[in-house]
Image (cartoon, grey):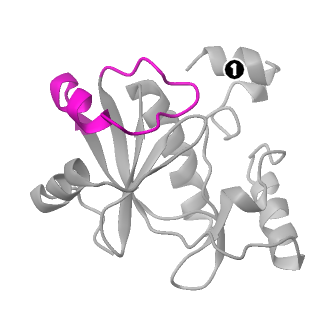
Amino acid sequence: MNLKFSKNRRRKLLTAKKHKSGSWCMFVPIDKSCGVKLYGSKRLRDASMLGQQHAAKAGLGPQVGSKVFIRAKTTRLFLQGKELPDNRKNIIQLYGYVTEIVDTKRIRYGNEYRDLVESLGKIGFQTFDIIPFNVGRLKRGNLVCLDFDPVYTPNNRLKNGLSYAQAQKNY
């Protein structure tokens, strides 16, 4: 799968009208196969990307592509009229990465969901935030996690005994 950030995909990203925002990032679909996760800091992007790459290697997360950077002037224009991630109200520049599209419709608790959560726990993820809203299905059919906030991932600070609030301050 081609997950490179081409000039054409950059143009589509900067003119996109649709997006979703969560606590840490903004997701913008740019074509049928991929979208871009955008963060307010390089450190947050890199930590989230590392967690998603770890999950993807185990078949538990979407594939990860190229890194993305949007300069301050372009960021101001891009963000006009868009809802920002909850924790990122003063974004100056955007850092992101290309990721595979995941279908988030009709995800329910069940054996497949429980197996995913258990498998993520076995490879080091904090699983208390892996709810159906943070799970989706790849075009290949398998169920995967799509929320890789750094406080939940194996490279996080929770592993070192910090609370969620303390770990959140690091980003």
Q: Is residue 49 above or below residue 95?
A: below
Residue 7 picture quarter: bottom left
Q: Residue furthest bottom?
A: 140
9 inside magenta stretch = no
- Give the percent coordinates (x, y) of residue 140: 53, 85
- Give the percent coordinates (x, y) of residue 105: 64, 73
- Give the percent coordinates (x, y) of residue 56: 55, 62
Residue 113 picture quarter: bottom right
Q: Residue furthest left?
A: 7
Residue in the image at 57% along x and 53% along y = 54
87 inside magenta stretch = yes
Q: Is residue 72 above or below residue 32?
A: above
Q: Is residue 44 left or right of residue 6?
A: right
**100 or 160: nearer the eye?**
100
Q: Which residue is mark 1?
A: 167
Residue in the image at 25% along x and 38% along y = 78
The amino acid pointed to by label 1 is Ala
Residue in the image at 71% along x and 38% along y = 152
Q: Quadrant of the C terminus?
A: top right
Residue 151 picture quarter: top right
Q: Is residue 13 left or right of residue 64?
A: left
**106 or 71: nearer the eye?**
106
Q: Quadrant of the N terminus?
A: bottom left
Look at the image and give the residue range highlighted in magenta. 69-92
Q: Is residue 125 above or below residue 58?
A: above
Circle 1 packing at 10 Å, graded few (<14), some (14-19), many (20+), is: some
- Give the percent coordinates (x, y) of residue 82: 39, 39
Residue in the image at 66% along x and 21% along y = 168
Q: Secondary structure at mark 1?
A: helix
